[in-house]
Amino acid sequence: MYSTTATDASNFVNTYNLAFYSIAIISVILLIGLTVTMLYFVFRYNKKKNKTATQNEGNTLLEIIWTTTPIILVLVMFYFGWAGWKPMTKAPKEAINITSVARMWSFSFIYENGKQSPDLIIPVNTPVKLKLESLDVIHSLFIPAFRVKSDMIPGREKMMWFLPQEVGQFDLYCAEYCGLRHSYMNSNVKVLSQADYNKWLADSVPVAADGSEKAVPGSEGFKIMINQGCNACHSSDGSKIVGPSYLHLFGEKQIVISEGKEIEVTVDENYIKKALYEPNAEIVKGYPKDLMQSYKDILTDEDIAKIIEYLKSLNEK
Ligand SMILES: [Cu+2]
C-alpha cells in the first residue's frame, strides 16, 4: 500500500524521471571524462616526460568540438526539463478543485463542499488542482511520489495540479524552512477509489462513523483542533511547545499583556473566543506575539463551543 517510489503514482513521474536521469547521466559522463583527461595530461606532459613545453597556437577542429558538444548537452538537459515542466503549468478543465492552506505548522485541505481535512484525500485517475495559499510565511508543498512541489507564498495566487494514478498513501510535507516546528509540518496524501472518495466526501463526520468517538466529551472539539493544526503549537499534556498547553487552562486565572499592560483574566468563553479571533489583543505572559493567526473567518461560534467542551474535558482527567 505505502510507497514513495512507485513509477506511476502520478502523470508527472516519467517525464520528471527522464529529466532527472538525463541530467544525472550527462553530469556523470562529464565528470569521468574531464577527470580522466586531466589525469592523462598530468602524467603525459609532466616535466620528466616533456622537458620543453609544447606550444599550441590553436586548433579549429578542437574549438568547434568543445563549443558544440556542451551546447548540445545543455540543450538536451533543457529540452527534458522544459518538456516535463510545461504540462505542470496548465491544469485540465475537468480537474477537481481543492484549496490547500498552509500555516505554521500544518496544512489543511478545503473541498468545494466545505469539507476540511488535514490529509489530502483524492480519487484515483481524476486530475486534481490545488489552489495554494499561505496564511503566514512562505511554505512549500511537496509530494515526492508525485514529483510535484511548489512554494506557497502569502498574498500570491499559485496552483499545482497532477493526476494520481495509483491507489495508496503517500507523504506530503513542507519543503521550505518555515520556523521552529517546520520539521513537523507533514501529512499524507490518500488516493482512494472513486467510490471510496465519494463516500468520504459526502460523510460529514468521518471519525464518528462507528459511533464510539462521538461518545467521548470534547472529541468533536478535538477533531476541529486537529483539522486546524492547533496541536502544532499547543499540547494537551501540560508541556509547552510554542504556545501554552491546553491542560488546566479553562477556568484558570492567567496573566496576559493587553495594550502593553499586564492584567489578570479568567479563562472563560469570551476569553477563548478573543484568543482565537484576535490573538494579538491579549498575549499570554512569557509567550511570543504574532505567532498565532486569527481564526475569525474559519471557526464558527459552534466550533468554539466544541473546542471549549474539549478544554473542559481535559480538566476532568
Ligand atoms: Cu512550512
Image (spheres, grey):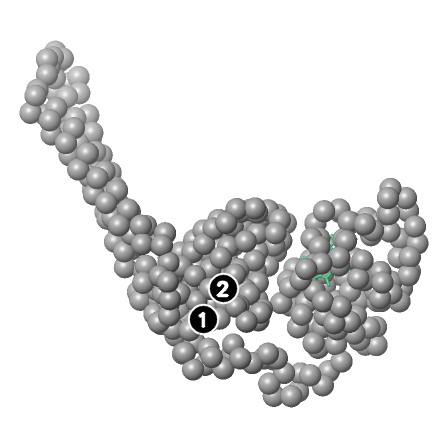
The Cα atoms of the two marked residues, 2 and 1, are separated by: 9 Å
In this picture, residue 162 sits left or right of residue 113: left
Q: Is residue 133 left or right of residue 93?
A: right
Task: Tell me the residue that label 1 is attached to.
Answer: 122
Viewer-proximal residue among 7 and 151: 151
Which of marks 1 and 2 precedes in the sequence? 2
Residue 116's spot in the image, x, y percent?
58, 69
Q: Dot 2: what SS?
A: strand
Quadrant of the image for the C terminus?
bottom right
Mark 1 C-beta to ligand 1 under 8 Å: no
Disc 1 crowd, CA 10 A, few/some/many (<14, 14-19, 20+): many
Looking at the image, do the residues carrying marks 2 and 1 touch, with CB atoms under 8 Å apart? yes
- Amino acid, disc 2: Ile
Per the image, the residue denoted by label 2 is 98
Left or right: residue 148 versus residue 49 is right
Residue at 71 percent of width and 58 percent of height: 296
Q: Position of residue 217 (x, y in %)?
A: 76, 80
